[in-house]
């Protein structure tokens, strides 16, 4: 049996020290750490941890939102952990402890997963409302479109526009230049090509 810690913060600017310290005090020896949004299910360290789990391992998280902000994703992750014969325990939510088969824990897991999702939804709603107010006051123009390569602003943007005019596919352009389709379409809009 091994105690494995999963640590996550949402951005590169955030620090994982608080989570790491608390999980180390709980006896964790193996740490899986990443700086990525909880909404993104394609998290390399989470996937690595899930693939390396063995029977009777215990996955510890500082709090439920570090694992996932989506109820659906959270329940999927819990099932993957249980499917390996391992269990999950949260330090901040004592009810989240699958080391024993307790129907009350299962019930609470569903409720608190819903609360985490509600919190995320409310945050996004407040953000949208704030943006609308700022737009009406002429203070918001959206995020600056920064399509760069090698620290030189504009090279990717110039190449993307050139290829678009040549008729290359959106998929090809985005994959080759490593830019998202949303960024590409914003670029076209900015250039008056859409």
Image (cartoon, grey):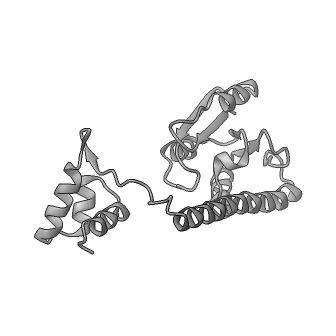
x 34%, y 65%: residue:
186
40 or 26: nearer the viewer: 40
* Residue 126, above or below 67: below
35 or 26: nearer the viewer: 35
Q: Residue furthest left?
A: 166
Where is residue 170? Give x, y as percent.
25, 68
Where is residue 154? Give x, y as percent.
23, 50
Q: Quadrant of residue 125?
A: bottom right
x 52%, y 47%: residue:
47
Where is residue 90? Give x, y as percent.
76, 42
62 or 140: nearer the viewer: 140
* Residue 193, above or below 3: below
Q: Quadrant of residue 83?
A: bottom right
Where is residue 188? Give x, y as percent.
27, 67
Q: In which quadrant of the rendered image does the N terminus lie?
A: top right
x 61%, y 32%: residue:
16
Q: Is residue 5 left or right of residue 152?
A: right
* Residue 98, above or below 180: above
141 or 85: nearer the viewer: 141
Q: Residue furthest bottom?
A: 194
């Amino acid at each position: 049996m091994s105690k494995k810690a999963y640590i996550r913060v949402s951005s590169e600017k955030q620090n994982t020290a608080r989570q790491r310290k608390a999980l180390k005090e709980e006896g964790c020896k193996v740490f899986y750490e990443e700086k990525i949004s909880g909404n993104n299910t394609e998290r390399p360290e989470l996937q690595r941890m899930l693939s390396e789990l063995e029977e009777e391992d215990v996955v510890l998280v500082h709090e439920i939102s570090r694992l996932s902000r989506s109820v659906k994703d959270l329940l999927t992750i819990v099932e993957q952990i249980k499917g390996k014969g391992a269990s999950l325990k949260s330090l901040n939510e004592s009810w989240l402890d699958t080391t024993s088969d307790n129907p009350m824990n299962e019930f609470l897991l569903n409720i608190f997963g819903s609360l985490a999702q509600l919190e995320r939804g409310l945050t996004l709603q407040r953000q949208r409302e704030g943006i609308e107010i700022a737009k009406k006051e002429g203070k918001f123009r959206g995020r600056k479109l920064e399509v760069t390569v090698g620290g030189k602003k504009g090279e990717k943007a110039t190449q993307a526009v050139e290829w678009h005019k040549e008729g290359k596919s959106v998929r090809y352009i985005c994959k080759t230049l490593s830019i998202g389709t949303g960024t590409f379409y914003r670029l076209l809009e900015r250039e008056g090509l859409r």
